[in-house]
Structures are given as structure tokens and as C-alpha cells.
Image (cartoon, rainbow, N blue to C red):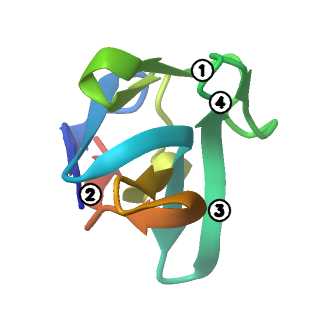
Amino acid sequence: VQVVESGGGLVQPGGSLRLSCAASGNIFNIYDMGWYRQTPEKQREMVAIITNFGQADYPDSVKGRFTISRDNAKNTVYLQMNSLKPEDTAVYYCKAQLTLTTQTYRRDDYWGQGTQVTVSS
């Protein structure tokens, strides 16, 4: 199984970025998908999570600015980030909770390699 993020980069404060994450391989079913971020100074934190039914949740720090969505047919999750602030600078990771075709009874978390988001003027 591969989980691959894309869409990071450098953006000015107040700008927008859209991250994408695609899961591929011998996947049977995908449940929750989420975005997390980490800096050298902080532990990894959740910034958005979405169930396979489309129910989303956000921490207060990004609520109203970030929107998570998913395309179940493409095993893909997106993160639209608006009104970006310097404190949003971090490596953003995607996580997919899924079952394999060879182990349909067991859910495991699979992480991407991360994509850097830098908010700076």
C-alpha cells in the first residue's frame, strides 16, 4: 500500500493551498482519512479528519479556514487551506485507516511521507 501526498509549497500569509493524498495498492476498504502536521518544536497534531461517510472534524486552530474532502472512488483525500498563517508552517502528513484484500478483518493506519507547507512573506 502506498499513501502519497502532493500540493505543498511556499505561500504568503493569507494565501491558499490545496493538498492531495492518494492511497493505492491491495486495498479492500478505506475508513477514516485525515491530515496531520508536525514541526520540530511540536508533536504531530491532527488538523482534519473525515469518515468514509463524509463526516469531518477539525481543531479550533483551523476551523473555518481548512476544509477536508474525499473522493472514495479515487481513494483520495484533499485539504483546502485558506487564510494561511505563518503558524500553519509544518510538514503535513496524510493518514488512511484501511483494510487489505488479504486481511479484510483488520484495520491499520498507513501514513504518507509528508509534504512541506511554508507560510512566509
Disc 3 residue type?
Answer: Glu
Three-letter code, disc 2:
Gln
Q: Nearer the viewer, mark 4 or mark 3?
A: 4
Q: Which residue type does callout 1 highlight?
A: Arg
The residue that mark 3 highlights is 45
Cα–Cα span, label 2 and label 3: 15 Å
Q: Which of marks 4 and 3 is nearer the N terminus?
A: 3
Q: Mark 1 points at which residue?
A: 65
Q: Which residue is label 4 attached to? A: 51
Real-space CA distance between mark 4 and mark 3, rounded to the nearest whole angstrom: 18 Å
Instruction: State the SS at label 2.
Output: strand
Residue identified by numbered label 2: 116
| Mark toward the viewer: 2 or 4 | 4
- The amino acid type, in three-letter code, at marker 4 is Thr
Classify residue 37 as left or right of residue 62. Answer: left
- State the separation of the CA atoms marked 3 and 1: 16 Å
